[in-house]
Amino acid sequence: PREVADARMRIAGIDRFLQDVKDMAKLQADVEAAEAEATRLQEEERQHLLEVERRARAAQAGQGS
């Protein structure tokens, strides 16, 4: 009986560990997705700022002539 209880406790511990591993893998995937989205948004903002700068330079050049 005691061996059975010990075995059940060990199995429960292993099950918790395996669930923790799955949870960690999902969290890691979520972090990677968030980082990719942040990178995409940064690039989008960079492109927008470059376009604003280009337009400002074109407008300035137009005023100078």
Image (tube, rainbow, N blue to C red):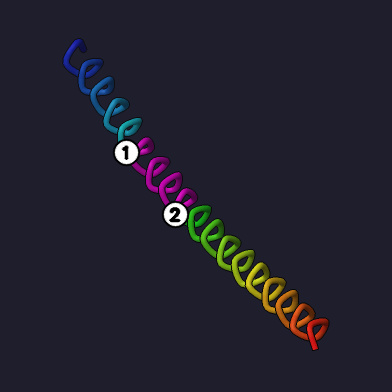
Figure quadrant of the C terminus:
bottom right
Helix, strand or loop at mark 2: helix
Q: Which residue is mark 2?
A: 32
- On screen, residue 34 above or below 6: below
Where residue 16 sits, quadrant-wise, is top left
**What residue is drawn where x is 32% and y is 26%?**
12
Q: Amino acid at mark 2?
A: Glu
Question: Looking at the picture, how far across and down is residue 4, in whole percent?
Answer: 21, 19
- On screen, residue 9 above or below 22: above
Instruction: Tell me the mark number nearer the camera, choosing from 1 and 2.
Output: 2
> Which residue is nearer to you in this view: 41 or 21?
41
> Which residue is nearer to you in this view: 34 or 54?
54
Locate residue 61 relative to residue 21 in the image: left or right: right
Magenta-highlighted residues: 19-32
Question: Looking at the picture, how far across and down is residue 28, in whole percent?
Answer: 41, 47
Q: Amino acid at mark 1?
A: Leu
